[in-house]
Image (cartoon, coloured by chain):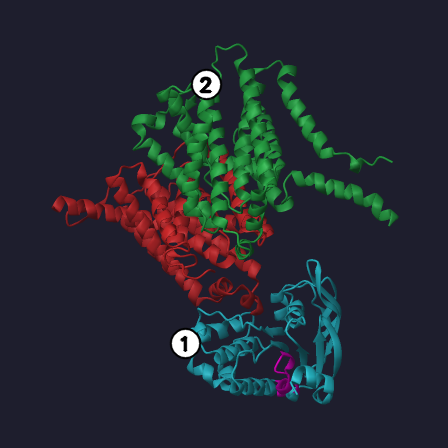
Amino acid sequence: MLQVRSLNVSYSALQVLWDINIDIQKGEIVTLVGSNGAGKTTLVSSILGFTKASSGNILFKGKEIQGEPPYDIVREGLSLVPEKRELFSRMTVLENLTLGAYFRKDESSTDEIFHLFPALKEAKDRNAGLLSGGQQQMLAIARCLMSKPEMIILDEPSLGLSPKFVHNVLEAVKSLNDEGLTILLVEQNVRRALEISDRGYVLENGQIVKSGSAEMFLEDDAIKEAYLGI
Amino acid sequence: MEGIITIISQVVFWGLYAGCIYILLATGLNLIFGVMKIVNFAHGEFLMLGTYITFSFFVLSGFNPYVLLCASLPILVVVGIITERLCFRPILGTGKLNEIFVSLGIIYVFQNVVAMLWTDEWKTIQSPYKDITISWGSVQVPLDYFIIIGITICILIGLYLFLHRTSLGRAIRATSQNRKGAMLMGINVEQMDMLTFGIGAGLAGAAGTLWAVSGQVFNPYMGSIPAIKGFAIIIIGGLGSIAGAIVGGLIIGLAENFTSFTLGGAWKDAVSFIILIIVLIVKPTGLFGGKDE
Amino acid sequence: MINARDLPIKKILIGLVLFFALIFPILFGAQLYYLTVLILILIFIIYSSAWNFLTFSGQGSLGHAAFFGLGGYFCSLLVMKAGIPPLLTLPIGGLFTGVIGVLIGLTCVRLREWFLAMVTFGFAIIIQTLIVSQLAPITNGWDGFGVTKLVPSDFPNSLLIEYYLIFAISVITLLLFRYLLKSKIGLTLAAIRENELEAKASGINPIPFKLFSFGVSAFFAGVAGALEIFHFGYITPEIFGVDISFWPIIYTITGGLGTLAGPVIGTIVISLLWEGLNSFGLTYMRFVIIGILLILTIIFLPGGLVSIGGKLSKYWNKSPDSDKK
């Protein structure tokens, strides 16, 4: 579904990502593991077209998307729940969701979404900026789903959330995947993420240093030590 | 005593009516600032073009000049879209001073193209209702003031409905609030830039028609001062806030007419800057502009 | 082997320009028209360089006509009311304008670019309003008044003497700017311009430096304004006009913002172009052309005309070298 091939990204003179190769199949959940400053967010923003790559290819459904503007990539069916959520904080929850379906020609309904996130239904007329952190994360995911994407990238969905909410979010992610959504999870909360994932990649200093099945990751001593805090 | 009240009421009506033109200018500037985070110092040139379009159509067709809003507004939308595409898009994100400098170039081009076509003499047209006044107690108010205030209110309501009730309007607001988020919704933000710039220019064009209809004189260089006042208004009212623009517009409109009356006509233009400077000394981010957007 | 690159091209160029400026009047027999154009170019070089100096501190102004006009008015009044010879009034008028500049700067130092632009623009209008209303008894309002010329017209070769005088003043001005920018003050200004927060963190208080550049910039804008008035021999409030505020910006941007040579080159090139277009009878069209040029420069040549040299020499140096490597 998504292939990243020999991707190099630099900010002016400083190279941040080196020869990144990632391959994600339809229907998978894949976790991208990496510490702060490893280049995770840069990778995500390059895939979505916010940051221009200096070389390499990014293919989505076999089509080159590298160099396209973010809004066209999103229209192809690849969407992102960004780390900072990027909600429209002076609009209501409902308006945020409506905007999520902005480019869908078919009449999209919020019923499904409210079924998945009941808390949002209660808050639908409140301004997004007034929601709690957990609700905002829910809204960010819900808004992203409104466009019925084929694949979503979740950048640090558990950041700043209470353990209970982290559980909720990851449960929701799992159930979305069961319905056929392809998911790339970028996480620091690695254990929980790996538990629901099929495979994983490790990003260190701008390079992919390891890849394999989630089970293998959970048992790998080096990964345990570096990222699982054991 | 009654005399004073009459004079004050006259001045208030004057202020309301003058405020209308500033509000239309400031609302356009504000929309553009909200979406693109740029300040269009050439905004007054759109006002000026609006007056000349009204003038030309009026001379050619003899239509009721109020009807010519249907010409000035759409034509200016197109002019705005072209200006954005050719002049502002290429420099977006290259530094704030560049936006100001590009505006200067645009000012020169528009002013002098108009001067070539229509000469630089002062022109004026007259409203068909110019002799009709409406009595409000002891106050005589020209009918045109009421029409202009009414049209401004209609345009603002129309704009509000467009921004809040239509998908395109929501997309513009989304781009204004969070550009990155808007892109993630599949919103083509560059198109929103063009559209917003067009709407802003259209509002200025409408203001131009109202300016001409109200019997005020205009020449190719008339745009700068009202535009800069429009900008003063949004600084006073808060960048990006439409409500702030309306309040600011009324404050400036009223203040201008009170100072003309007390300090003399020469101070009409300067007073908005005095207010502006006082506001900025007290609060460098503007009166209602709390957030740094 | 002598390489073209090793020659001090810059110094040679500067020398040529200076030499040409000195002998030009002699070559062309001191024709009135050419001399007038040259004198105005020199005055505007001082003015643009003064405007440009403000940008070295990261500030900008849309209302430098305030200082240009104040200098003009103050010096004219000194000449006409106090009987001081024009040349002597220049430093006094400059100083007065500089002080006003610092006062205006005080309201501006905390403001962001757009607000700053607005406020400076506003001051030009406020000062103009003062001159035509409350101060009208001494300024004669919109009608203005006549002023003694820098060099009285009945002097033999008065225009030629005036030219050399103003030439000397502009060279001194440019040397002073150069000295200031190379000095510790210049470096501090650069630090503030690049990153004000970082400059603050390293213990620099940016406010006095910003005020200083406001003062210096206003001083020379005032001197330039006075020189223009002493050239024409008449002053009106038109001197505060919006276009007077815009010219130094156009000259500097076309030449190259933030460089010493930029305002000089920009003023010369645009003024000559201006006069050339005028001789074709293009009254309004020349404004349109200048406007389009300005927009094109900002979009396609952000470094201004001075950056062409750098680009060319880069290209020049690259092509033979890259083959060898």
Residue A188 inside the magenta-drawn segment: yes
| Chain seen in red | B
- Residue C149's disc is 2
Q: Judge from the rendering whether residue B122 lies leftward or rightward of residue A198; answer left or right.
A: left
From the top left corner, tell me how far across and down residue A42 is, in percent. 65, 68
* Marks 1, 2 in one chain: no
From the top left corner, tell me how far across and down residue A99 is, in percent. 51, 71
Q: Secondary structure at mark 2?
A: loop
Query: Is residue B102 shown above or below C73?
Result: below
Alpha carbons under labels 1 and 2: distance apart: 73 Å
Mark 1 neighbour class, 10 Å CA radius: few under 14, some 14 to 19, many 20 or more: few
Residue at coordinates 69% horizontally, 26% vertically from top-left?
C16
Identify the residue position indicated by label 1 in the image: A125
Q: Judge from the rendering whether residue B149 lies leftward or rightward of residue C151; answer left or right.
A: left
**Magenta part of the chain:** A177-194
Residue A122 sits in quarter: bottom left
Give the colour chain A carries in the figure.
Answer: cyan
Chain to which mark 2 belongs:
C
**Is C4 or B162 nearer to us in this picture?**
C4
Look at the image and tell me whether residue B129 can be seen: no
Q: Which amino acid, by three-letter code, is at mark 1?
A: Asp
Q: Secondary structure at mark 1?
A: loop
Residue B89 inside the magenta-drawn segment: no
**Is B134 or C16 nearer to us in this picture?**
C16
Query: Is residue C175 shown above or below C168?
Result: below
Chain to which mark 1 belongs:
A
Residue at coordinates 59% horizontally, 15% vertically from top-left?
C30
Give the colour chain C carries in the figure.
Answer: green
From the top left corner, tell me how far across and down residue C91 is, in percent. 46, 28
Q: Nearer the viewer, mark 1 or mark 2?
A: 2
